Amino acid sequence: MPVGYSGTPLPKKLGFSETTRLAVLHGPSDYLSIVGAVPDGLQVTAELGASTNLVHLFVTERERLAAELARLRKALNPEAVIWVSWPKKASKVPTTVTEDVIREVALPLGFVDVKVCAVTEVWSGLKLVVRKELRLKSAL
């Protein structure tokens, strides 16, 4: 089971639970083997649905990041979580995405970043949620 630097299993770092309805977008084909053992009841799909409460988005281009985050902001329940993964510099994978670029794109859409983690030797992850005050407005 991949644990990264912290020693915490990846499914726990990503917040997976038995009630997670996970959409993996543009992820590696071996995503579940990378993640390791997931909680019983977790549902994984490559499509967004009404019950999707966690998205793991993989991007290498700023343009795709911007398009996907705008789409997700409109499509998801404001309580949903989005993990954005981008290639680490050390991976040498060509990319126009960095942690700072994710913030530049996400913050104007009403997201805030709340956690960062190592996903694999290649991918880092930044956890985004809708700002609390915007979640409250959406619930009214």
Image (spheres, grey):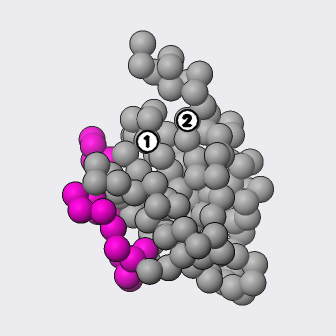
Magenta residue span? 30-52
The quadrant of the picture occupied by the N terminus is bottom left
Disc 2 designates what residue?
130
Q: Is residue 125 left or right of residue 78?
A: right
Of the pair 120 and 64, the residue shown nearer to us: 120
Q: Is residue 33 left or right of residue 60?
A: left
Extreme bottom residue here?
Answer: 92
Please tell me which of labels 2 and 1 falls first in the chain. 1
Q: Is residue 107 above or below residue 8?
A: above
Crowdedness of circle 1 by 10 Å Cα count: few (<14), some, many (20+)? some
Q: Where is residue 36 drawn, in percent x and y? A: 39, 77
Does dot 2 land on a helix, a strand or a loop?
Answer: strand
Q: Quadrant of residue 26?
A: bottom left
Residue drawn where x is 68% and y is 54% of the image: 102
Whether residue 21 is visible here, answered yes or no, is no
> What is the three-letter code of the residue carrying label 1?
Ala
Q: Is residue 95 left or right of residue 55?
A: right
Q: Is residue 75 magenta?
A: no
Secondary structure mostly seen in the magenta stretch: loop
Crowdedness of circle 2 by 10 Å Cα count: few (<14), some, many (20+)? many
Q: Quadrant of residue 53?
A: top left
Q: Where is residue 13 drawn, in percent x and y? A: 52, 61
Q: Where is residue 97 drawn, in percent x and y? A: 70, 65
User: Tags 2 and 1 in contact by the CB under 8 Å rule?
Assistant: yes
> What is the three-letter code of the residue carrying label 2?
Val
Q: Is residue 53 above or below residue 101?
A: above
